């Protein structure tokens, strides 16, 4: 079976985790500090604060930026629900604009239109599927509105915009290290920022509001959102491999696009200045039945996935929120993601292309 996702771990991670176990410091500790510094350096940011997962990273960033009850956060309706859930967790409300039909990312013009009509207290922009959003436009919009900008980079490890790593454009950026991501810690996340005071607030927030790790002085009411040393040990190995992982994803994506060029599928784009990290290789299925194509792939032992079949504002949990997002709603009906992860071989890429091409033509 060619799976839609597959984490790549080997004896190196096992050895590093064993070293941590033998050290006796398996919760938050020196291994986490090393991972934070190394991931921040990889992304060219000053501060990294590791968390228990990507959702808690978003929660911590929003709260530490002062977003709370009564505030409204502009974001995309076409993302994993965690993007909106984190907004709700701090007591704020999501406000949805529509997406760009080509990139699937939040559309800057739609976002500006919504912000003109509605009070906005912060912006979360998502780099969906590993493709950077139009950060020049969103930095400008956040500056014009005088509100903080957060990058949800949960799917974009290794992506770049105008030569600059994603995660370096906003006031804060949040990554996830779930097993399906471009690199993993098992479960985990991180908040990146260049602002020392914000980094301090995030670090307190995820550690019960402590003034300093190891003390019992708590200046605020915080949470236990810390990463474990076991997770950090895995992450440090994965980070060493991340450039190679991303290169292989990009190679697989290039081969898939060549192999599917004779079909009527709408293939992923990568327009300068964006460099795609291909967390997902996502096509639009417009002239055929998407479910039938996915079933056909499964019959040939090829996995696929729909990310995401329902826009956030159409989820039962968000019944009270209205959104004018027809492009996002259409994308939810059309998209299908194909295997592109580093474990997919050249022969398997050729097999995927052949199975789809023969079915559609």
Image (cartoon, rainbow, N blue to C red):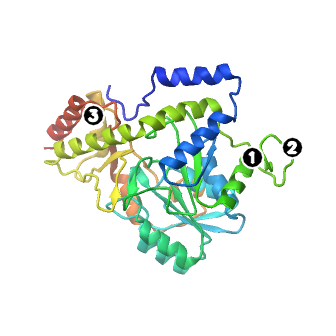
Where does label 1 land, which residue?
223
Question: In screen coordinates, is 99 left or right of 92?
Answer: left
Label 3 element class? helix
Task: Tell me: residue 187, above or below residue 87.
Answer: above
Q: Residues within 10 Å of mark 3 (few under 14, many from 20)?
A: some
Along the polypeptide, which appears first: circle 2 or circle 1? 2
Residue 328 placement (x, y as % from top left): 41, 60
Asked whether 24 or 154 is in front, the reply is: 24
**Residue visible at 41% across and 74% down?**
109
**Is residue 167 visible to the viewer in this orientation of the structure?**
yes
**Residue visible at 75% across and 45% down?**
207
**Residue visible at 71% across and 63% down?**
68
Whole-Å distance between the Cαs marked 3 and 1? 44 Å
Q: Quadrant of residue 17?
A: top right
Task: Tell me: residue 246, above or below residue 195.
Answer: above
Question: In screen coordinates, is 132 left or right of 357?
Answer: right
Where does label 2 land, which residue?
216
Q: Which mark is residue 297?
A: 3
Mark 2 or mark 1, which is nearer to you?
2
Is the residue under label 1 in contact with that under label 3 (CB below 8 Å)? no
């Amino acid at each position: 079976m060619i799976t839609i996702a597959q984490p790549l771990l080997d004896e190196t991670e096992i050895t590093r985790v064993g070293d941590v176990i033998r050290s006796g410091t398996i919760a938050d500790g020196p291994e986490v500090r090393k991972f934070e510094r190394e991931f921040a350096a990889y992304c060219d940011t000053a501060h990294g604060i590791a968390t228990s997962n990507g959702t808690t990273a978003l929660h911590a960033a929003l709260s530490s930026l002062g977003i709370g009850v009564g505030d409204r956060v502009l974001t995309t309706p076409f993302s994993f629900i965690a993007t909106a859930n984190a907004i709700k967790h701090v007591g704020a409300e999501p406000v949805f604009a529509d997406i760009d039909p080509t990139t699937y990312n939040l559309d800057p013009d739609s976002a500006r239109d919504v912000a003109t009509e509605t009070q906005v207290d912060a912006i979360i922009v998502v780099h969906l599927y590993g493709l950077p959003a139009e950060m020049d436009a969103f930095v400008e919009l956040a500056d014009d509105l005088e509100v903080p900008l957060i990058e949800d980079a949960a799917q974009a490890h290794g992506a770049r915009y105008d030569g600059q790593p994603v995660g370096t454009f906003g006031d804060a950026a949040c990554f996830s290290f779930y097993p399906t991501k471009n690199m993993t810690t098992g479960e985990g996340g991180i908040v990146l920022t260049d602002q020392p005071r914000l980094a301090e607030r995030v670090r307190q927030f995820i550690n019960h509001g402590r003034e300093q790790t190891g003390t019992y002085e708590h200046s605020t009411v915080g949470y236990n959102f810390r990463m474990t040393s076991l997770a950090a040990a895995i992450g440090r190995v994965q980070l060493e491999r991340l450039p190679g992982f991303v290169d292989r994803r990009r190679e697989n994506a290039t081969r898939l696009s060549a192999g599917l060029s004779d079909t009527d599928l709408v293939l992923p784009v990568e327009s300068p200045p964006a460099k795609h990290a291909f967390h997902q290789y996502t096509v639009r299925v417009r002239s055929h039945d998407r479910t039938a194509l996915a079933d056909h792939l499964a019959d040939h032992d090829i996995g696929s996935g729909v990310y995401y079949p329902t826009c956030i504002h159409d989820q039962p949990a968000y019944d009270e929120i209205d959104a004018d997002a027809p492009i996002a709603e259409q994308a939810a009906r059309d998209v299908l993601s194909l295997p592109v992860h580093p474990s997919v071989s050249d022969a398997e890429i050729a097999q995927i292309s052949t199975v789809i091409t023969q079915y559609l033509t």
